[in-house]
Image (tube, rainbow, N blue to C red):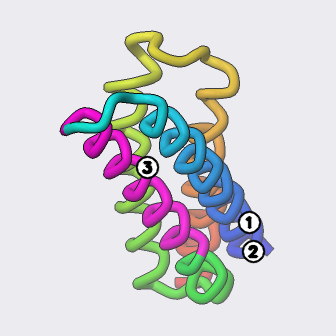
């Protein structure tokens, strides 16, 4: 049961990042064409990729408590959210709410996935 709750938390994290990708793309589209716009669009693409990857790993691997899936999502989502907290959330570039939702689901996913991973080993 814990592995499935962890997987669901990763899916929610992924969906939040799909939404963030769309919002970031829209923000980039409002900028003047050039390097800054391209880099913001690249950030949106990265958010889309990380969101889809986290969802795929959650559905196909974390749901079954797969060792590779555990480590893949744990490392990838941690790196993504630490950067977000450090560079965007902590400096106050976006409001704490809803900004804290991604990190909240990240922590919940790791807690439930780790309980499942340790219990079944």
**Cβ–Cβ below 8 Å for labels 1 and 2?**
yes
State the residue at coordinates (37%, 47%).
41
- Judging depth in this view, the residue of 82 and 43 nearest the camera is 43
- Judging depth in this view, the residue of 44 and 90 nearest the camera is 44
State the residue at coordinates (68%, 21%).
97
- Residue pointed to by mark 2: 4
Examine the rendered structure and indicate whether residue 11 appears above or below residue 58: above
Point out the tag, 1 or 3, that comes first from the N-terminus: 1
Please say whether residue 108 is visible from this viewpoint. no
Q: Main secondary structure of the magenta part?
A: helix
User: Which image quarter: residue 115?
Assistant: bottom right
Q: Residue 106: x, y in percent? A: 56, 48
Which span of residues is magenta-colored?
35-55
Q: Residue 80: x, y in percent? A: 38, 48
Q: Residue 100: x, y in percent? A: 61, 29
Examine the rendered structure and indicate whether residue 33 appears above or below residue 78: above
Please say whether residue 105 is visible from this viewpoint. yes
């Amino acid at each position: 049961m814990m592995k499935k709750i962890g997987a669901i938390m990763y899916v929610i994290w992924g969906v939040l990042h799909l939404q963030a990708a769309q919002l970031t793309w829209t923000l980039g589209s409002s900028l003047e064409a050039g390097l800054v716009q391209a880099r913001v669009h690249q950030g949106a693409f990265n958010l889309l990729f990380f969101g889809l990857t986290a969802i795929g790993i959650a559905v196909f691997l974390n749901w079954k408590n797969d060792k590779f899936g555990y480590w893949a999502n744990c490392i990838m989502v941690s790196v993504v959210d630490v950067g977000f907290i450090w560079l965007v959330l902590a400096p106050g570039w976006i409001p704490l709410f809803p900004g804290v939702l991604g990190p909240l689901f990240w922590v919940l996913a790791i807690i439930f996935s780790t309980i499942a991973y340790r219990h079944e080993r």
